[in-house]
Amino acid sequence: MSHSSTQSGGTASALPSLTPGPYRKRLGVVALIATFGGLLFGYDTGVINGALGPMSKELGLTPFTEGLVTASLLLGAAIGAVALGRLADAWGRRKTITLLAVLFFVGALTCVLSPNLGVMVTGRFILGLAVGGASTVVPVFLAELAPFEIRGSLAGRNELAIVVGQLAAFVINAIIGIVWGEQGGVWRIMLSIQLIPAVALFIGMLRMPESPRWLADNGFHEKALQVLSELRPANRAEPELAEIEKVKEEEEAEKLDWKSIVEDKWLFRILLVGIGLGVAQQFTGINSIMYYGQQVLTESGFSSSAALIANIAPGVIAVIGGVIAVSIMDRFSRRKTFLLGFALTTVCHILIGVGSIVLPVGNPIRPFVILFLVVAFVGSMQTFLNVAVWVTLSEIFPLKMRAFGMGVSVFCLWIANFVLGLYFPSLIAAVGITGTFFVFAALGALSWIFCFKAVPETRGRTLEQLEEEVTTGVIYLPEHMRGQ
């Protein structure tokens, strides 16, 4: 692609601006249904936090097999991210999300009825395939449906749905744990709740449109125009489709298999940026808090029933942070958001480590100080990092490598998550809260340096503009030098 980004800048300004209209309501409905995938992702990853204790007693789990039950979902997610990302390229985004609903349902039912560790791990693995698929396909689907002006807030709704799902899991666990805590099989009730949104996702996706960019890329010009006409102001569908088709024609000559991506320095560089962002997000340790929050709070001095209730606080702040993040996503630099986020989370880790040294076990204020700092950490993470990472991953890759780039990045993200999920209980047992959070602080400092050095700005450009800037390397130039 030889033409300069000034030309692509012209393209963006040539698109008629977004005016109010009925299309906004339709966009909102499509986003709401698709984000049931994120809601299920959140519930599945959060429910284990409260279900693990009673499940361990009933199924006779050891600390290592507890890690195995938690991490089997994460291993499934790593595989699902790649496999279902590729399927979404071949089969379409909408059909793939419908398949995810079936996997969510089958996996959840297997877990609920599970008589032993083997069946439980199998069910969690199937759920993992669905969670990994949702983490790749839903943000891409939303980014490809959204007008570029509101792409950040629309694609960011998926991350908001994830934290709402996690909060729902924490609240439902606490209610079920308090009401039926003494009965056997209480964890089966906790796990069964997720069957409801799985059915809603399946029924809802049958009535949703396909991604217009996927349709255009696969030769369905009329259908793509029809979808854009539903989801854009009346005068905007045709010029936007023309822009998508133009980029498609330029790319026809460039068949992007993994080898050609690795051999192209700019494409390989953006792939490394995607992988780095995914791994850095996990190495904050956010999901260790989401999976094992109850154990961290018990270790800090809460009783197990108090920890189940206190655990709702990080869930609430995660949702508040998610709402703020979605509302600021289209107004603030993605790069500056990352730098602020990694700085804040690293400071929180250091303070948790220091707090657990200064306030020894048995000090009455220790559990509350650690809870406050954990809540501050989760709030910083959700406000400045989680939404921004997923939105950026859904938009930085050119169309021909989008599902591949997203799949590989999210695969690496889930592998990092799997390693943390499997070994976090052992890490807490070996070095306690203090050592664990100092490890996270060191990883956070490295992540900040990576973002400062390597991550480019993506806000305020159409996906087609970003495509040109990535493939020509212009995206890595300072803002004032772009378009010259």
Image: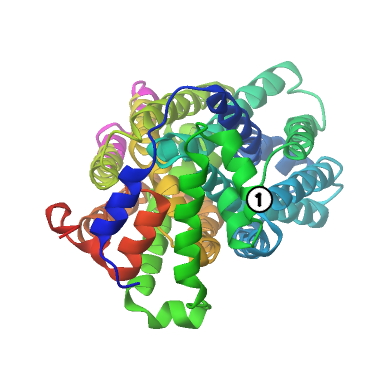
The stretch of residues the image draws in magenta is 352-368
Residue at which label 1 appears = 222
Residue visible at 54% across and 43% down? 145
Q: Amino acid at mark 1?
A: Glu
Foreground residue, 241 or 351? 241
| Residue 365 shown in magenta | yes
Foreground residue, 385 or 230? 230
| Residue 355 shown in magenta | yes
Residue visible at 34% across and 51% down? 11
Q: Position of residue 4 (x, y in %)?
A: 25, 64
Residue 270 quadrant: bottom left
Q: Is residue 117 above or below residue 329?
A: below
Residue 183 quadrant: top right
Q: Is residue 372 above or below residue 98?
A: above
Q: Residues within 10 Å of mark 1 (few under 14, many from 20)?
A: few
Residue visible at 29% across and 56% down? 447
